[in-house]
C-alpha cells in the first residue's frame, strides 16, 4: 500500500498566463490595506482629495498663517486705488494672475487675499467642528450603547433635548455668545474663529451620538465581546480594543459629512452677521458685505461662492469614498467592471486545455 504523498501548496496563483498577467501573491491583506485600496480606487474621492489639498495649500501659503508670511503681496485689509473698476486680472490665455486676480472691492482691497483668509477660517471652523463632534458624539453614544440602563436613559434624553432644537438657531445663539465672550475678555479676533467652531461642534454632535449608540448596541452582543468578557477583560478594554475599532467606519464617514455641513452653517451664520466679525473675513461675510454690488460687480460673489461650493462638494465626495471603502456593500454597481469580470471568468475554462498541453 503506497503512502500518501505530501501536497505542495504553491505560494502564488497564476491567473490567465496567456494574457500576460503576472503571478499574484495570495497572502491576506490587513483591514487598513483593504480600506486604502478601495478608497484610492474611487476616482471621484481621489480627485476631491487632491482638490481639497490644493485649496488648503493655496489658502495657507498665499497669505500665510499666524506669524508665518505668505508669498502673496497684498493683505486682506490693505486698501489702494481701484484699477479698471476693480475687475479681475486673472487670465488663462496666456496664464497670468496679474495684480488682483479676483478683483477689488470698492475700497481697493484685494479680493484674492480676502477670499484666502475666508477660506482659512472656514477650514479651521470645519476642522474644529469635526474634532469636537467626533469626541463628544462618540463618547456619549458609546457610553449609552455599552452600559445601557440609567446611563443610556440620561444620555439619550439629553441627546433628544438638543436634537429637537434647530441647529441653525442653536448655532446662531452660541455664535453670538462666543463673539460677546471673546470681546469681553479682550482676546484676539482670531479667537472668535476657534470659539465659533467649538460651540457649533457642541451643537452638532447628537446625530453622531445616536449612530454610535446603535453600533455599540449591536456589537456588544457579538460573540467576540462575550469571549472577551469571559477572558476577564475590563469594560474599558472591551470598548477601546474590541468595539470601538469596529465603529471607526461609521464614525469617520459621519464626521466627514458633518464637516461639510459645518462649512455651510458657518457661511450662513457669517452671512447673517452672527459668525465671524470684522476685521476678520469669512466666505459668508464676503458675500454679505458685497451683496449690494451683485448687479454691477458680480465677481465679488463668484469667487467666495466658488470656494464654498468646492469645499462642500469635495468633502461630500471624500465622505462617499470613505463610506464605500469601509463598507464595500455600499459600492455602486459598475456595468463595465461586471462585464470585464464576466469575460475573465469565461476565458478561464478555455485557457485550461492549453495549459494542460
Image (cartoon, helix red, strand yellow):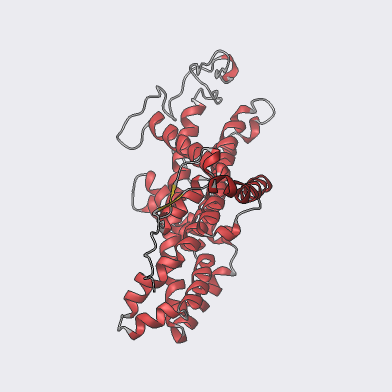
Q: Position of residue 161 (x, y in %)?
A: 55, 74
- Depth check: give the residue in front, 54 or 233: 233
Residue at the (55%, 37%) spot, across then down: 307
| Quadrant of the drawing holding the C terminus | top right
**Is 124 positioned to the left or the right of 107 in the image?**
left
Instruction: Relative to 275, say whether 290 is above or below.
Output: above
Which quarter of the figure has residue 147? bottom left
Residue at 47 percent across and 81 percent down: it is 221
Q: Is residue 76 visible?
A: yes
Tell me residue 282's x, y (percent): 50, 40
Q: Residue at x 66, y 31 (%)?
A: 294
Quadrant position of residue 29: bottom left
61, 8: nearer the viewer: 8
- Image point 38% across, 44% down: which residue? 190
Does any portion of residue 285 appear in the rendered image?
no
Question: Quick one: 91 or 159, which is closer to the camera?
Answer: 91
Q: Considering only vertical position in the picture, is 31 above or below 113?
A: below
For the image, the number of numbered tags is 0
- The answer to whether residue 284 is left or right of residue 294 is left
Q: Quadrant of the N terminus?
A: bottom left
**Viewer-closest of 188 and 224:** 224
Where residue 262 sits in the image (x, y, percent)?
A: 52, 52
Place of residue 140 in the rendered image (x, y in percent of width and height, measured from the top left): 44, 72
Q: Is residue 236 left or right of residue 115?
A: left
Amino acid at each position: 500500500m503506497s503512502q500518501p504523498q505530501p501536497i505542495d501548496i504553491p505560494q502564488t496563483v497564476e491567473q490567465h498566463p496567456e494574457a500576460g498577467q503576472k503571478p499574484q501573491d495570495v497572502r491576506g491583506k490587513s483591514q487598513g490595506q483593504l480600506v486604502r485600496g478601495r478608497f484610492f480606487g474611487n476616482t471621484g474621492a481621489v480627485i476631491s482629495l487632491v482638490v481639497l489639498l490644493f485649496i488648503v495649500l493655496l489658502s495657507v501659503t498665499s497669505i500665510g498663517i499666524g506669524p508665518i508670511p505668505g508669498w502673496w503681496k497684498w493683505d486682506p485689509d490693505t486698501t489702494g486705488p481701484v484699477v479698471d473698476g476693480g475687475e479681475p486680472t486673472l487670465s488663462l490665455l496666456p496664464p497670468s494672475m496679474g495684480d488682483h486676480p479676483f478683483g477689488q472691492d470698492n475700497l481697493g482691497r484685494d479680493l484674492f487675499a480676502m477670499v484666502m483668509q475666508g477660506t482659512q477660517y472656514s477650514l479651521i471652523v470645519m476642522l474644529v467642528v469635526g474634532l469636537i463632534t467626533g469626541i463628544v458624539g462618540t463618547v456619549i453614544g458609546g457610553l449609552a450603547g455599552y452600559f445601557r440602563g440609567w446611563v443610556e436613559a440620561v444620555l439619550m434624553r439629553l441627546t433628544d433635548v438638543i436634537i429637537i432644537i434647530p441647529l441653525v438657531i442653536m448655532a446662531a445663539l452660541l455664535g453670538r455668545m462666543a463673539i460677546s465672550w471673546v470681546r469681553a475678555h479682550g482676546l484676539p479676533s482670531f479667537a472668535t474663529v476657534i470659539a465659533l467652531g467649538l460651540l457649533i461642534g457642541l451643537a452638532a454632535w447628537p446625530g453622531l451620538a445616536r449612530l454610535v449608540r446603535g453600533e455599540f448596541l449591536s456589537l456588544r452582543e457579538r460573540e467576540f465581546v462575550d469571549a472577551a468578557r469571559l477572558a476577564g477583560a475590563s469594560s474599558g478594554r472591551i470598548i477601546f480594543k474590541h468595539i470601538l475599532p469596529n465603529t471607526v467606519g461609521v464614525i469617520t464617514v459621519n464626521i466627514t459629512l458633518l464637516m461639510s455641513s459645518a462649512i455651510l452653517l458657518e457661511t450662513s451664520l457669517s452671512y447673517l452677521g452672527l459668525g465671524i466679525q470684522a476685521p476678520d473675513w469669512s466666505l459668508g461675510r464676503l458675500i454679505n458685505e458685497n451683496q449690494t454690488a451683485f448687479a454691477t460687480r458680480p465677481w465679488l460673489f463668484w469667487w467666495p461662492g466658488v470656494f464654498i461650493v468646492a469645499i462642500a462638494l469635495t468633502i461630500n465626495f471624500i465622505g462617499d469614498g470613505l463610506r464605500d471603502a469601509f463598507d464595500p456593500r455600499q459600492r455602486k454597481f459598475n456595468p463595465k467592471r461586471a462585464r470585464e469580470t464576466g469575460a475573465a471568468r469565461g476565458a478561464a475554462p478555455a485557457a485550461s486545455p492549453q495549459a494542460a498541453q
